Image (cartoon, rainbow, N blue to C red):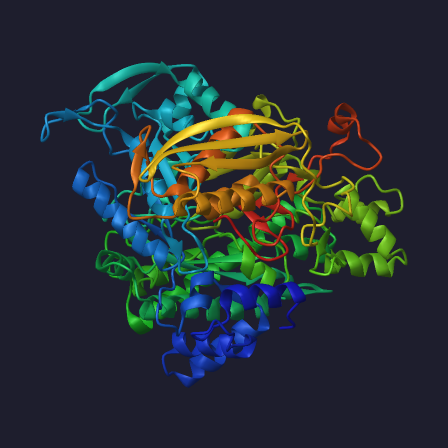
């Protein structure tokens, strides 16, 4: 596999092994040799197959496998679900276990549905419960304190049943986007609830503690609130719990209550799954898809993922036991949009939908054929008896693929893996493979990256570049124009047949996004990670349509995102960036402080005494900070003055306030102190708290290093009308633009991911 410059950056930063001095001691060949050798466990034939599989770029496993296989950690799974019981011991045991998983590089999902509602009686203490939302905040704070294997922050999913008495509080709990930012949240929706919505019926909210009806509400009111909040900032999502459990392969073992952080992997409590993705971009030929080659890669990929289970070091014995009892794997895809580009098939077309079904059925069928063959060699997964395969309820269409014959073979020989297929996020591994993410359309076809000396590099989708070169119209100037426009749709220089095929996420209507998700879901054991993108002017009615269509088309869940709906999104594709001031990676001088500023002063209790934090603004936003505590001339006072000066410098240099908060928040000292119900862990943590409060009070949008106005349009009202529909945030690590995809926030340039 030929590595692009971006792939090399991602590998160097996140995957290559380093020595004690932090020096890189691996390259691509050494990495895949390490991984293949570890998974093959001394089998030379397997080692050769696995090395070739990885080196071709036809398949890559999830990031923890690439990072940890053959290293001391040896934790190879990406996603876990932990049980959450309604007791203080159970809750804090789960927090401890989640911290261990985050430390090892995994993400966690939880169902908070068993926790009794606020003010419910607690007999053991003769007190009352604080409710699931308060404990959700405790989980979020614990995640803040754990850096995930030195590679990323922990990511979580929180799910609450729609019939829980505190469902309204849950739906609104992320209204303040500075809160609970380590969690994605989704409402667990039942068939009864959806019928009540359709029929405009009442719906009971039932206590999980005593099973009594606590309130009767209108189902449509709850549904409307979900829609309203999702329209506002993309959350909550919806998980169709009854539908997920209808396809639960081991119903006798337990009920599925939650998913992993991005929603594509429903799991039983104490279960994990290791994932990997086939790069469909590599299987195109002029005659069509190379089906025989794809079949061979499916077989090798299933073998690889099954062997990952054998060599993984799971963080808890309960997880080890559950994983090896079910042996779930999740084989998915990436490069779908790039495959469509090569085949000249528009994403939003019946031809693309039909091809999606055909491709995923092929992968699903042959992954189960191979799993059945592995069962003949090594035995079925231990919980096979009583599974949906044991009683022949594996339902698939009787197409030219011989599903009925396969059912009979599974009945006779068993199945090695309880699930075989998952469509997972592929943010960084698709960057390594130089292809599109998962089943998502391309978010942008041309994007700009700035390097340290200020040089501007333009990255162009390889298939678009080839097509434009064939048409004789490729030029740097045209690429710059595409970058500024955000797509091809309105460029007269581009032939219509190219425009029809090379579409981006916002060129595609939400209906086609959902239909594509549903087509892949039809032949996927687990679920599908996908973001349904909406333009900024989408209405709540549009969001409602998406949720209902996802339900009607048998999706297992749905995540929507209306462009620009979060206040911190400040860069718009299609705008001209002020190239002197706004280059993310160019060294700059802070702006001059004006003679007059205005601001607020906050008093915060710390373990060292009363702290007074003043934050002032000029006409471009926050510009300076003053901190006062104790007598002038003391050591603490000097340290705080230095901190305030550096923060002021950063603010006037247009550094994102939230980036400053992340650096300061959670720093600990020997004297923590409670302040207004929240623990202040140090003076630096108090400063972070003051900055967060400043954001809340001012409702600011100017929190990043990007200027909203173009050179030619200084009028804010005109500029607002002229905005394109692809607002995005800047990456906290490299300053490049990031975007919403596969239920997560990602950076194309350096591989950073919020999840």
**Total numbered labels:** 0
Identify which residue is drawn at 48% across, 82% down.
48
On-image quarter of the N terminus: bottom right
Q: 755 or 514: nearer the eye?
A: 755
Q: Kindly give the residue lying farthest to the bottom in the view shown.
A: 44
Give percent across and percent down for residue 223: 45, 22
Identify which residue is drawn at 55% across, 40% down.
657
Give percent across and percent down for residue 521: 49, 46
- Say whether residue 717 is left or right of residue 277: right
Q: 628 or 359: nearer the eye?
A: 628
Q: 52 or 676: nearer the eye?
A: 676
| Quarter of the image where one finds residue 210 | top left
| Quarter of the image where one finds residue 620 | top right
Give percent across and percent down for residue 13: 54, 65
Vertical arrangement, residue 591 with respect to residue 331, above or below: above
- Residue 547 in view of the camera: no
Vertical arrangement, residue 240 with respect to residue 479, above or below: above
Give percent across and percent down for residue 467: 81, 58
Q: 176 or 361: nearer the eye?
A: 176
| Quarter of the image where one finds residue 242 | top left
- Say whether residue 108 is left or right of residue 4: left
Identify which residue is drawn at 45% across, 46% down.
638
- Residue 717 in view of the camera: yes
- Say whether residue 5 is left or right of residue 246: right
């Amino acid at each position: 596999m030929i590595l692009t410059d971006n792939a090399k950056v991602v590998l160097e930063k996140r995957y290559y092994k380093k020595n004690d001095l932090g020096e890189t001691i691996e390259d691509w060949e050494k990495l895949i040799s390490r991984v293949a050798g570890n998974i093959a466990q001394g089998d030379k034939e397997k080692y050769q197959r696995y090395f070739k599989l990885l080196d071709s770029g036809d398949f890559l496993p999830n990031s923890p496998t690439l990072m940890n296989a053959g290293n001391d950690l040896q934790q190879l799974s990406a996603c876990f679900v932990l049980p959450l019981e309604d007791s203080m011991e159970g809750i804090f045991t789960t927090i401890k276990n989640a911290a261990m998983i985050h430390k090892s590089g995994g993400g966690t999902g939880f169902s908070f549905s068993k926790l009794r509602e606020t003010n419910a009686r607690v007999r053991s203490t003769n007190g009352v419960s604080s409710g699931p939302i308060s404990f959700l905040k405790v989980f979020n704070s614990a995640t803040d304190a754990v850096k995930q294997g030195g590679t990323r922050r922990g990511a979580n999913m929180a799910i609450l049943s729609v019939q829980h008495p505190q469902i309204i509080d849950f739906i609104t709990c992320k209204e303040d986007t500075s809160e609970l930012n380590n969690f994605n949240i989704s409402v667990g929706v039942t068939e009864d609830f959806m019928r009540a919505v359709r029929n405009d019926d009442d719906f009971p909210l039932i206590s999980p503690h005593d099973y009594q009806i606590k309130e009767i509400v209108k189902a449509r009111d709850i549904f409307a609130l979900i829609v309203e909040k999702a329209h506002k900032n993309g959350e909550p999502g919806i998980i169709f719990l009854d539908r997920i459990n209808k396809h639960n392969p081991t119903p006798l073992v337990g009920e599925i209550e939650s998913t992993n952080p991005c929603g594509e992997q429903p799991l039983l409590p104490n279960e994990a799954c290791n994932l990997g993705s086939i790069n469909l971009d590599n299987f195109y030929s002029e005659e069509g898809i190379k089906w025989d080659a794809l079949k061979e890669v499916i077989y090798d990929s299933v073998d690889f993922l099954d062997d990952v289970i054998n060599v993984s070091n799971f963080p808890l014995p309960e997880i080890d036991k559950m994983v090896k009892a079910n042996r779930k794997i999740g084989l998915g895809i990436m490069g779908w949009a790039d495959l469509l580009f090569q085949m000249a098939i528009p994403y939003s077309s019946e031809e693309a939908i039909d091809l999606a079904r055909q491709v995923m059925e092929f992968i699903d069928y042959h992954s189960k054929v191979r799993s059945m063959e592995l069962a003949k060699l090594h035995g079925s997964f231990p919980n096979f008896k009583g599974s949906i395969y044991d009683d022949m309820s594996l339902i698939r269409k009787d197409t030219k693929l011989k599903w009925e014959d396969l059912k009979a073979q599974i009945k006779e020989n068993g199945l090695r893996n309880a699930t075989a297929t998952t469509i997972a996020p592929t943010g960084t591994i698709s960057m390594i493979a130089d292809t599109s993410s998962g089943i998502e359309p391309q978010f942008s076809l041309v994007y700009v990256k700035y390097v340290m000396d200020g040089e501007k590099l333009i990255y162009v989708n390889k298939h678009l570049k080839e097509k434009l070169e064939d048409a004789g119209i490729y030029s740097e100037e045209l690429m710059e124009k595409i970058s500024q426009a955000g797509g091809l749709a309105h460029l007269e220089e581009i032939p219509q047949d190219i425009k029809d095929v090379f579409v981006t996420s916002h060129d595609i209507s939400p209906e086609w996004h959902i239909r594509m998700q549903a087509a892949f879901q039809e032949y996927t054991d687990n679920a599908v990670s996908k973001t349904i993108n909406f333009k900024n002017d989408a209405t709540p009615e549009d969001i409602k349509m998406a949720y209902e269509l996802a339900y009607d088309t048998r999706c297992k869940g749905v995540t929507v995102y209306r462009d620009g709906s979060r206040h911190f999104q400040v860069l718009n594709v299609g705008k001209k960036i002020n190239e002197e001031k706004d280059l993310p990676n160019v060294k700059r001088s802070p702006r001059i402080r004006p003679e007059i500023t205005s601001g607020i002063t906050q008093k915060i209790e710390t373990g060292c005494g009363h702290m007074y934090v003043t934050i002032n603004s000029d006409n471009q936003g926050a510009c300076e900070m003053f901190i006062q505590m104790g007598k002038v001339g003391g050591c603490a006072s000097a340290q705080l003055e230095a901190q305030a000066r550096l923060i002021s410098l950063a603010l006037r240099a247009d550094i994102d306030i939230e980036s400053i908060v992340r650096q300061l928040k959670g720093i600990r000292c020997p004297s923590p102190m409670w302040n207004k119900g929240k623990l202040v862990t140090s003076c630096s943590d108090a400063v972070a708290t003051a900055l967060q409060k400043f954001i809340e009070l001012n409702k600011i949008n100017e929190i990043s290093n990007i200027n909203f106005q173009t050179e030619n349009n200084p009028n804010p009202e005109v500029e607002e009308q002229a905005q394109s529909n692809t607002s995005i945030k800047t990456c906290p690590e490299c300053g490049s633009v990031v975007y919403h995809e596969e239920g997560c926030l990602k950076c194309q340039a350096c591989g950073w991911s919020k999840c």
